[in-house]
Image (tube, grey):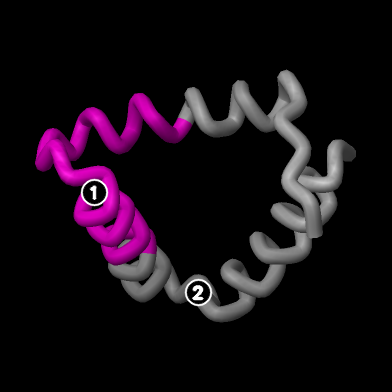
Amino acid sequence: MKYKKTKANKDRAERIAATLEAYGNGDTTDDMVDVVTDLRHYAAQNKINFTEILAVSENHFEVEAEGE
């Protein structure tokens, strides 16, 4: 898959950048791990199937990355 840098994908990346900044670690990789881990905690506490969320997310990413 070739990633297309569309305006929509740029907007998506910028939206999550604000969330990562809120974690304030300064290490983007660590901040991303923290965000995903916190999402897992949220899912567990709210009885949401996180594995299913990841699968759906992967499908959405593939479509969006191709410029959808």
Residue 31's disc is 1
Cα–Cα span, label 1 and label 2: 19 Å
**For the residue labelled by badge 2, is the local secondary structure a helix, a strand or a loop?**
helix
Residue 60 picture location, percent across and down: 75, 55
Which mark is on residue 50?
Answer: 2
Q: Residue at x 45, y 75 (%)?
A: 47
Q: Residue at x 36, y 75 (%)?
A: 44
Q: Toward the viewer: 43 or 27?
A: 27
Q: Tell me if label 1 and label 2 are in contact, CB under 8 Å.
A: no
Judge depth for marks 1 and 2 and give the one in front. 1
Magenta stretch? 16-39
Label 2 neighbour load within 10 Å: few <14, some 14-19, many 20+: some
Instruction: Please state if 51 lies on the left or on the right of 26 as rendered.
Output: right
Query: Residue 30 location in percent, x, y?
Result: 21, 55
42 or 13, nearer to the observer:
13
Image quarter in which the N terminus is found: bottom right
Q: Is residue 44 above or below residue 26?
A: below
